[in-house]
Image: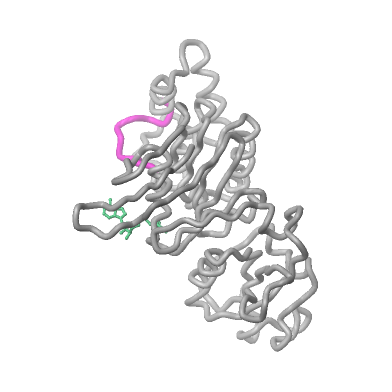
Amino acid sequence: MRLDGVWLRYGWRAPWVLRDVRVELGPGRSAVVLGRNGVGKSTLLQLAAGVLSPTRGTVRERPPTVGWVPERFPANQPYTVEQYLTGMGRVRGVAGPALRPVVEGWLARLGLTPYRDVRLAALSKGTAQKVGLAQALLRPPELLVLDEPWEGLDAATRELVPELIREVRENHGAVLVSDHRGETVRLPDAEQWTVVDGTVSVVRPATTGAGTPGAGEMSVVELAVPATRVAQVVADLRAAGHQVLGVRPPAPEGGVPGPGRGPADDSTVPPGAGQGPADDPVVGPAAPGSLVGSVDQGGGPGEAS
Ligand SMILES: Nc1ncnc2c1ncn2[C@@H]1O[C@H](COP(=O)(O)OP(=O)(O)OP(=O)(O)O)[C@@H](O)[C@H]1O
């Protein structure tokens, strides 16, 4: 799938959201779309999925089977979960006797079996998101596009998302995913597509990411930031290509991290230190927090994150 000189704006006199975007994603590959709120991540994903058409330029080689999971599942439909998935399975060409086991399989895997007879409109946001995931996977997608797939999901299903992505890739599908929660730290081998001012820059995993083969030595840097700015600082660091490993709650006395976490005036700690939160990053606590990020060892003082 390739976006070839794609421009998009939402109206004749509206500002351009995306300008001359040129990106491609081949079979078996994955990319994470990063950037500030409102910069155009969802727009890019919708173009890739075929939900939106470019104002100028072309989307080429989009495969026939696309799984699209929007940020908010449109639950205002008069079907039960089972009726909806069965209908979507038919739409996607899962025919005859194969359809029932496929639907049953996804109901079970995503913990939806108890909700099979519940109408979509009565589901919680998280359960509706799971139905959104299931419908996209009824037929193995050649391109899976996930807009903030972790939003509203329970912990068990959040853990499942990287596994589902890996399965699609192993099946030679491509995966495009946006994320502002920091969950994509679980996808270390994905490309990073960063949207800034309407353009998209691509960083391949061979040149970024802690622990990525060939990435060069990484350092871990700790920062203390005001609670109200945590989410924005995390987004800014990611947009700049840094990897945020986690966010910790404040030290008991408040303010900067306490002893054992590195003195505040010497924020560089050995590689690997402070990586505990990487397994379960929590972004945006309600109180002051400290960030743990990583930078390439070669970065100058101004690049520390
Ligand atoms: N249907 C629409 N009609 C008009 N403007 C839109 C529409 N959808 C998005 N926009 C505008 O396009 C810009 C990009 O929006 P988009 O949703 O793609 O950003 P985003 O990076 O996904 O944001 P977020 O992180 O908040 O989800 C924003 O200024 C938004 O207001």
Classify 133 as above or below 250: above
Which residue is outermost to the bottom?
265
Q: Position of residue 202 (x, y in %)?
A: 55, 54
Classify 86 as above or below 230: above
Classify 222 as above or below 21: below
Q: Is residue 128 visible?
A: no
66 with respect to 240 (left or right): left
Nearer to us in this view, 103 or 142? 142
Q: Is residue 119 magenta?
A: no
Nearer to us in this view, 269 or 55? 55
* Image quarter of residue 217: bottom right
Q: Position of residue 246 (x, y in %)?
A: 64, 66
Q: Looking at the image, which residue is at 61% across and 46% down?
A: 156
Q: Is residue 78 magenta?
A: yes
Q: Looking at the image, which residue is at 49% across and 37% down?
A: 1
* Image quarter of residue 256: bottom right
Nearer to us in this view, 131 or 45? 45
Which residue is outermost to the top?
96
Q: Position of residue 102 (x, y in %)?
A: 53, 22
Which residue is outermost to the left?
13
Q: Position of residue 177 (x, y in %)?
A: 51, 47
272 with respect to 43 (left or right): right
Classify 108 as above or below 90: below
**Prevailing SS of the magenta stretch:** loop
Q: Which residues are magenta?
A: 73-82
Nearer to us in this view, 243 or 80? 243
Quadrant field for ligand 1: bottom left
Q: Where's the C terminus, which quadrant?
A: bottom right
Q: Looking at the image, which residue is at 54% across and 27% down?
A: 140
